[in-house]
Image (tube, rainbow, N blue to C red):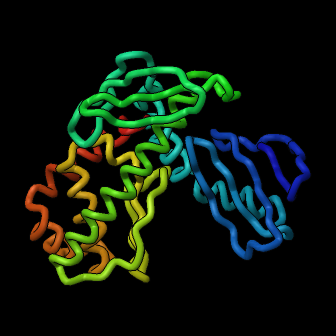
């Protein structure tokens, strides 16, 4: 067990729960919660919460915690290795396959020409070639995602008579999309690594949340009305989503 108090750290004797955990205290927190990410357990608590209370809380939730750890360990074990980039590497883009063409110039740059994605590496950069390539690819995909997903969202909202106040993109940890109560939609830009049908399903899903902020039968009926293949698309994304990483 590791315990954090602001910037101070102490390591009391471990408690036998079948898993390691970290205590993170905050003066702004008013309740106790357990957070599990990448099979690592953090119990978050107010400054004044006594340690025996936190340990008892973990004991009460121990079965659930162990199940979540096991689930996340299995997920981590099946995650693909990071992509390796070299001259001629093949990169998916909305059902197409783009070929990486590497070059060198005074300034780093990236541009698509037909089915080739030209990446120019700069000798002035402090990054390694691989890091430069990843950075440039990430920027290019984000630019494409914002343009494409904004357009697709606008087209669908207009057709459905709905209003989206903003479209933004982000590489989120666990969600492919999110719709706020104020009508703003956020997409995970790495969805562009999937076939276009999956991209369209994601847009249909988030746009439908503009009317139904839940996953009720009415919500899924609305999704089906604009994306009849949503069940297959949803299953594909659940099965293959972990592989959609640059």
Q: Nearer the viewer, residue 78 or 59?
A: 78
Seen as rendered, the residue at the extreme front is: 106
Please identify the quarter of the rendering in which residue 45 is found. Answer: bottom right
Residue 46: image location, x then y, percent: 79, 69
Residue 188: image location, x then y, percent: 41, 53
Picture residue at 44% right of the left edge, 25% below the top: 83
Picture residue at 14% right of the left edge, 49% below the top: 232
Q: Quadrant of the N terminus?
A: top right
Picture residue at 70% right of the left edge, 46% below the top: 21
Picture residue at 82% right of the left edge, 50% below the top: 3
Position of 33 compared to 161: left or right? right
Please identify the quarter of the rendering in which residue 194 is found. Answer: top left
Q: Is residue 50 above or below residue 94?
A: below
Q: Is residue 234 above or below residue 49?
A: above
Q: Nearer the viewer, residue 72 or 228?
A: 228
Seen as rendered, the residue at the extreme top is: 87
How many circles with numbers are drawn on the protein? Answer: 0
Residue 202: image location, x then y, percent: 27, 58
Q: Nearer the viewer, residue 53 or 227?
A: 227
Q: Quadrant of the C terminus?
A: top left
Position of 153 compared to 52: left or right? left
Residue 144: image location, x then y, percent: 37, 50
Q: Is residue 234 above or below residue 157?
A: above
Position of 158 compared to 190: left or right? left
């Amino acid at each position: 067990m590791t315990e954090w108090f602001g910037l101070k750290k102490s390591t009391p004797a471990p408690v036998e729960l079948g898993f390691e955990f970290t205590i993170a205290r905050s003066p702004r927190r008013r309740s106790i919660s357990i957070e599990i990410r990448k099979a690592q357990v953090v119990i978050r608590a107010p400054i004044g919460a006594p340690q025996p209370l936190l340990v008892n809380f973990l004991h009460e939730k121990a079965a659930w915690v162990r199940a979540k750890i096991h689930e996340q360990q299995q997920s981590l074990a099946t995650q693909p290795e990071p992509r390796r980039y070299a001259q001629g590497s093949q990169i998916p883009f909305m059902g197409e396959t783009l070929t990486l063409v590497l070059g060198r110039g005074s300034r780093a740059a990236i541009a698509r020409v037909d089915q080739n994605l030209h990446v120019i590496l700069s000798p002035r950069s402090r990054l390694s070639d691989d890091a430069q390539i990843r950075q440039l690819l990430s920027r290019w995909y984000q630019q494409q995602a914002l343009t494409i997903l904004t357009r697709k969202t606008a087209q669908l909202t207009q057709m459905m008579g709905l209003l989206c106040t903003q479209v933004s993109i982000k590489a989120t940890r666990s969600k492919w999309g999110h719709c706020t109560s104020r009508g703003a939609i956020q997409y995970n830009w790495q969805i562009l690594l999937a076939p276009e049908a999956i991209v369209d399903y994601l847009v249909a899903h988030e746009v439908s949340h503009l009317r139904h902020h839940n996953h009720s039968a009415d919500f899924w009926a609305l999704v089906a009305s604009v994306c009849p293949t949503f069940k297959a698309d949803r299953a594909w994304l659940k099965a293959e989503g972990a592989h959609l990483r640059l």
